Amino acid sequence: MGANRGENSPLREAALIIVDVQNDFCPGGSLAVPEGDQVVPVINKLAPLFPVVVATQDWHPANHCSFQAQGGPWPPHCVQGSTGAQLHPAVDRQHITAYVKKGVLPNKDAYSGFEGTDEAGRTLAELLRQRGVKEIYVTGLATDYCVRATALDGLKEGFKVHVVTDAVRGVNVKPGDDQRALEEMRAAGAFLKTSAEILSGAGVGEAVGASAYAESPQ
Ligand code: VGL
Ligand code: ZN
């Protein structure tokens, strides 16, 4: 209720992509992204605006090649069926229309949501096209890995891509990795937007920027 999701909505052909907002990527998790949980309230505010909302999940077997025990770069994380692999409990499931899992094979890593499939075996690109989606708004974790890969693949798949800058956080193995990733996405053709810009564009804004446009006070 409330939000305009109808035929006049500017977001009627848009999908919100919630990338890997899973317990293991949030504070307390095995591969915690600093402030990872802070994307959740922003995502929950945006989700009601979108006719299609897809949540991706990193979903690894226990012997996944990206884990250090197998010579990979990461501690074990998002093991299939574990609590760490579940979405953060505060993510509002109500508006999620599809779940896509990726990284499910032992010998192949998959950072991009576009390498994942839903329960019916559809790729992310297939299910978006089936729903008439032309543009995607990418949120979630982590800016410098799976968000980056998902946004860049979205562009390659022909979608208009927006990255919601206050709804993503980076791992920052090297300081500044998140900012470099955002710049790379922008240079590749993605639009960087704040949630406030999206909310006000959809007519549910808090008049952000109003002061900048207001007539000068008396
Ligand atoms: C991710 C590292 C390893 C991510 C997934 O979701 O960004 N990062 N696996
Ligand atoms: Zn992973």
Image (cartoon, helix red, strand yellow):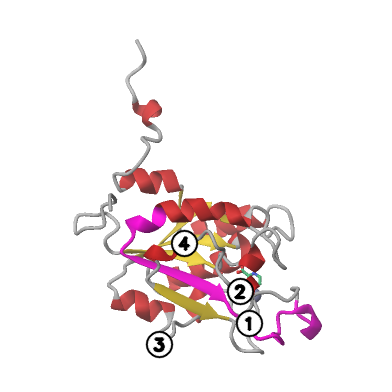
- Number of numbered markers: 4
Identify the residue at horizontal 63%, vertical 73% (top origin): 83
Part of the protein shown in magenta: 46-72
Dot in front, 4 or 1 = 1
Residue that carries the numbered disc 4 in the rendered image: 138
First in sequence: mark 2 or mark 4?
A: 2
Which residue lies under the disc numbered 3? 120
> Marks 3 and 2, Cα distance to the nearest angstrom?
20 Å
Distance CA(mark 2)–CA(mark 4): 20 Å
Is residue 26 found left or right of 40 in the rendered image? right
Q: Amino acid at mark 2?
A: Ala
- Residue type indicated by callout 1: His
**Residue 60 bears which disc, if any?**
1
Asked whether the residues under the numbered discs 4 and 3 touch, taking CB atoms below 8 Å apart as contact, a structural biologist would say: no
Viewer-closest of 1 and 168: 1
From the top left corner, tell me how far across and down residue 58 is, in percent: 58, 75
Q: Quadrant of residue 206?
A: top left
